[in-house]
Amino acid sequence: GARALDDTEREGLSNSDVVWLAPPVVRADHSVLPAALDALAGRTDRLYLHLDLDVIDPAELRANLYACDGGLTVDEVVAAIAAAGERLEIAAVSLTAFDASADDERRGPAVAARLLAAVAAAVDAAA
């Protein structure tokens, strides 16, 4: 879900084992996220799920001053969490990158609660 990367960030990602799926790629081809998760599940069985709230498009949540257009919707993030939980045990989760002073519409707590509920549902489904 990362976007608006500078050249150094882009190079770092391309030279790492991280699979970067930009929002337009996820939307254009619904098979890329499941394929990436399946590949990950072939290497491990547990997942540390790190959720930066600024991955969400500011139209749905302005998580911080760095949030930029073109992000994922809350529904897309919920679906990604469910897909991850179907393939891997979610061992831990972090919810980060939220600055309440940037959230003029006060959507952050409800969005965070919805994402954490999706994590709980994924964990319950796996149990």
Image: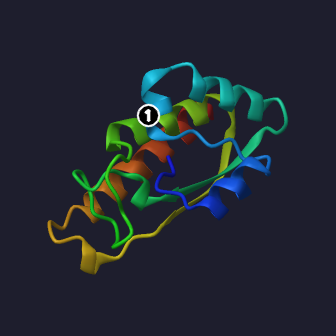
Image coordinates for residue 100, horizontal then vertical, percent: 29, 76
Does residue 127 sit above or below 52 in this rendering? above
Residue at (70% x, 47% y) in the render: 47
Q: For the residue marked with disc 1, what is the amino acid? A: Pro
Q: Mark 1 Cα within 10 Å, few/some/many (few <14, many 20+)?
A: few
Q: Find residue 42 and report its horizontal and vertical position in percent.
A: 82, 29
Front-lying residue, 112 or 123: 112
In this picture, residue 87 sits left or right of residue 28: right
- The C terminus lies in quadrant: top right
Residue lying at 40% horizontally and 60% vertically, measured from the top left: 54
Asked whether, in this view, residue 20 is left or right of residue 12, the answer is: left
Q: Quadrant of residue 11?
A: bottom right
In the figure, is residue 119 to the left or right of 100? right
Q: Quadrant of residue 67?
A: bottom left
Q: Secondary structure at mark 1?
A: helix
Residue 20 in the image: above or below residue 52 = above
Residue position for label 1: 24
Q: Residue at x 60, y 35 (%)?
A: 84
Query: Residue farthest to the right?
Result: 43
**What is the count of numbered marks?**
1
Task: Kindly identify the residue that appears in the image at 57 percent across and 41 percent down.
Answer: 123
Q: Nearer the viewer, residue 86 or 80?
A: 80
Residue 87 percent across, percent down from the top left: 67, 29
Q: Of residues 25 and 112, which is closer to you in this image?
A: 25
Furthest residue in direction bottom, as rendered = 101
Tell me residue 31's x, y (percent).
Answer: 56, 19
